[in-house]
Image: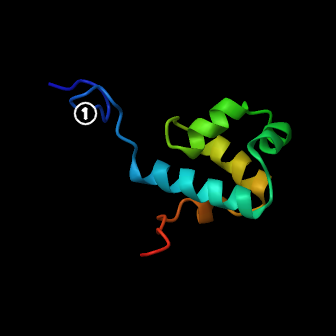
Amino acid sequence: MNEGHGANDHGHTDVSPGRLSFSKNFRIARKKAGLTQLQIRELTGFSQAWLSEVETGKSTISLDNMHVLAHAVGVPLWTLLLPHKEPDE
């Protein structure tokens, strides 16, 4: 029986759809803003390694930190929380 939050039979943590939407939308917004992860690090003080994990959905993120990242790329936070659509959808 699984005791962890969202852990599957292999011990991996499932990524919530909301976190995955934020991750993908943030990466797209960062690239549209012409910013690298290193530039986001300079703007926010967050480590580049953590930013990479956020963008791939491997790290959890607080609402406060989502707001900081949204501000760094110049978009309203709510736009990064919308369900992500793949280009062929």
Above-or-below relation of 16 to 58 = below
Is 21 placed left or right of 12 in the picture? Answer: right
Above-or-below relation of 15 to 78 = above
User: Could you tell me residue 41's position as x and y percent?
Assistant: 79, 37
Q: Residue at x 29, y 25 (%)?
A: 11
Task: Name the residue carrying label 1.
Answer: 8
Q: Residue at x 74, y 43 (%)?
A: 37
User: Could you tell me residue 42's position as x and y percent?
Assistant: 85, 38
Q: Residue at x 52, y 35 (%)?
A: 59
Identify the amino acid type marked 1: Asn
Colour scheme used in the picture? rainbow
Is 10 placed left or right of 59 in the picture? Answer: left
Is 1 placed left or right of 47 in the picture? Answer: left
Q: Residue at x 24, y 24 (%)?
A: 3
- The residue tagged with tag 1: helix, strand or loop? loop
- Asked whether residue 49 is in view, the answer is yes
Q: Quadrant of the C terminus?
A: bottom left
Residue 7 picture quarter: top left
Decide which of 81, 34 is in the foreground and name it.
34
